[in-house]
Image (cartoon, rainbow, N blue to C red):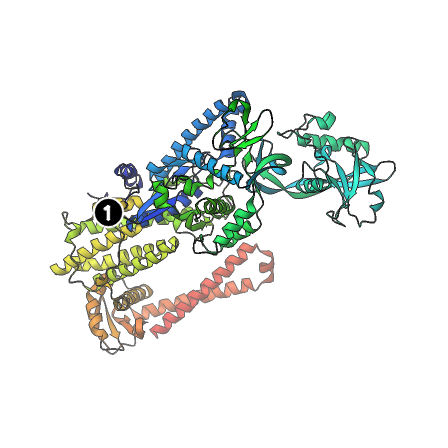
Amino acid sequence: MKLQDKYDHHQVEGDKYDNWVKKGYFEAGDTSKKPYSIVIPPPNVTGKLHLGHAWDTTLQDIIIRYKRMQGYDALWLPGMDHAGIATQAKVEARMREEGLSRYDLGREKFLEKAWSWKEEYASIIRSQWAKLGLSLDYSKERFTLDEGLSEAVKTVFVTLYNKGLIYQGERIINWDPVQRTALSDIEVYHKDIKGYMYYFKYKIEGSDDTLVVATTRPETMFGDTAIFVHPDDERYTKYVGMKAINPANGEALPIMADDYIELGKGTSVMKCTPAHDPNDFALGKKYGLAMPICMTDDGHMNALCGKYEGMDRFECRDALVKDFEAAGVVDHIEEIVHPVGHSERSHAIVEPRLSKQWFVKMKPLAQAALKNQETDDKVNFVPERFEKTFTQWMENIEDWCISRQLWWGHQIPAWYNKQTGEVYVGKEAPKDIENWKQDEDVLDTWFSSALWPFSTMGWPDTEAPLFKRYFPTDTLVTGYDIIFFWVSRMIFQSLEFTKRRPFNHVLIHGLIRDEQGRKMSKSLGNGVDPMDVIDQYGADTLRFFLTNNTAPGQDMRYVPSKLESISHFINKIWNSARFVLMNIDEDMSYDDITLEHLNLPDQWILNRLNEVITSVNNNMDKFEFGNVGSELYDFIWNEFCSWYIELAKETLNGDDQQAKIATRSTLVYVLNATLRLLHPFMPFVTEEIYQAIPHKAESIVIASWPEADERFANDKIDDQFAYLIDIVKAIREIRHQYVIKNSVEVAYIMSTNSDDLEDLLQDMAPFIAKLVNAKVAGYNLPVDRNSANAVIKGGNTLSINLGAYIDMEAEKAKAEKEIAKLEKELERSKKMLSNPNFVNKAPAAKVEAEKKKQADYEAKYKAAKEKLASFE
């Protein structure tokens, strides 16, 4: 197999993935090996994968490919999440374009459309996984609504219910009036918006006095059932026990006292609306107040609201305030900016609403999870600081509202007797089903997702082969933004139902931001489609970028220029492979490698390879992929390509056949090992090159991970080779500084502190000659006063007699001329920057530019003076 003259990612990445899948390289199940497992955080079937998904899954793919090559039976289990409210919102949006609502179709027909959507987008997601090169075991793919996971969900619900950990209760919950469903606290985001604090006069019954009450939500006044003041507030104690007239509906509200009211805050008079505010609900329960709901589930005013019935809640607010102004009820109105809850999915303003819902009693489950973190079976957070985030959440956790008023999801396994109202909870429907009606609500998406690490393995069948072999899983990779949503819930559910942690490690990454550090969003128009990036740069480039531009737990910035540099790096690898292929026999096999009669560069690069393998292993095991990428980049670009390949040319163009065999073998050995080290990051290009050069395995996907070879360990060689590097760099710097053309061979003298060094330097002389066209004139010889000197490793000195290569007087004159020019520029710049008119009145950017110019002139002036001094 030959490599094309130029690297083309379209050609390289075109057909490999299908072949890998067809050959079964990604399928786990070899019981002769030690198992290692990861379950994919299931993407929602709401749409296409974004750049965050690409980052998250690339990290997982790196881990699983690394473990597979290390000889593990590596399972990476794929799957997708039904994403209840998010998917239902998408399906309903599409139906609205057709002029339909879910109520027009009914539940069964609507679910047919939802399943059709799921199949459409699941297919798209699989094609995107393929384009990214993810080595997923598709034979074990799961979906959160498939039959097995439904069985797990029912088992968990019924078990928790029977243990008293799931209950039904009336509570104030977050209500999405667009999706017409309850939301948990973490499905709500808060955004500062402009609003108003309204101050209204409530007339005291039987008196001309009034109480001024403040509210941001006048439309809820139709649900008011009391007025509260503080028992120690001397302004109002005389009114306690009396009644105030609600200006919205004329009802007389009892005036009550409770120390919940804050003295000195606002008017210190509070209206109580128990069905529309969580704090008011607590007061309502305390005093046995009525809890009327004044809105419909889609955010419109109901029959309690008189002439405002049928109005949208915000229309009602405006109309009510206008009427109050006309009636003289408004005391004053203040403009404010305040945080308002919004639905994560529909982005509607959330309405606190009294509702009967299903809840999970969280304290016992959270305490068990926290206690487990003190044992050897704890979940190890990477970075460790995120355990604190988990702990704080668990310590302050509230009961979890798990019911949703949706149709797409796991329908709650509860039935109500049509005659008696009795509740039955079970995995199967009651036998006399005609007398029972199933609860129409479905479970929160996270309820089923929380079971993902073990439900996908066949649980509740504890004898299921996958469960017995691969659970607990080894590593979970996810973003810090869903530690609350998902990670914490998987931990407490796994401990409750399997008595084990769900994963040994959880690797936390950040968010991808744009080049300016802003969060990517539709509103800013700064989102990036990973598939577009792959089309432009290739999957290997994108993957390497995503894993080498941040540390664990940190956010990342998407910087296109970095993709360009990675693309150049892959070209460098490609061209190095082509060089190797051009310098070996076409029929050479991996078994033909003969690593004997090694010269100094051969020994050095093989020892460096050993060191790189050891370092890469350490960093891979710590999930420090950025360190791995930097190390491999430096080793390939600088050491292998820039140094070793250039030095190898000297040997390959020589007459020593043994030396040629050794260098050819070294080239193949190092390139082959390097490709395997790179493979988890760049699966496509490494496979292409691996197949072209001598190799062992059928595919690099199933090749073995490189191991450090003790035959090449040499604790002195790095130190010795550093002399060669220093000498070459010194000669290049002298050539550059004194403008000596590369075509001119220069002679150098080495002044050493040790006689033992001469033999080593003599061995290096042919390679130095090749790299910088220089010959050694001798060791510890007298040095001409016109010599340029450079101190190299160990305090040894390299000298080149400049008089032999340049016109000293002409160079001296040039230096003097340059100094004179720079002195004038410095004088001009200093005058300008000492002029207050310029400094204070010129644009800041112009002043800063002048300061930079001055610093540049000073650096050049110093260098020119040093150069002149060397001539004198």
Where residue 208 sits, quadrant-wise, is top right
Residue 800, image x, y percentages? 27, 71
Quadrant of the rendering where the N terminus is positioned? top left
Quadrant of the rendering where the C terminus is positioned? bottom left
Left/right of residue 522 with respect to residue 699 in the rendered view:
right
Q: Which of 104 and 228 is in front in this view?
A: 228
Residue 738, image x, y percentages? 32, 66
Residue that appears at 44% across and 52% down: 379
Left/right of residue 648 with respect to residue 479 in the rendered view:
left
| Above or below: residue 595 compared with residue 312 | below
Where residue 721 sits, quadrant-wise, is bottom left
Q: Residues within 10 Å of mark 1 (few under 14, many from 20)?
A: many
At label 1, the amino acid type is Tyr
Residue 686, image x, y percentages? 28, 47
Q: Mark 1 points at which residue?
A: 690
Count the marks.
Answer: 1
Name the residue furthest right.
Answer: 207
* Helix, strand or loop status at disc 1: helix
Residue 253, image x, y percentages? 79, 36
Left/right of residue 779 with respect to residue 421 in the rendered view:
left
* Residue 541 seen from this side: no
| Above or below: residue 859 compared with residue 782 | above
Q: Nearer the viewer, residue 379 or 5?
A: 379
Q: Which of 8 and 671 is in front in this view?
A: 671
| Above or below: residue 321 compared with residue 453 | above
Q: Nearer the viewer, residue 493 or 672?
A: 493
* Residue 131 seen from this side: yes
| Above or below: residue 65 compared with residue 827 | above
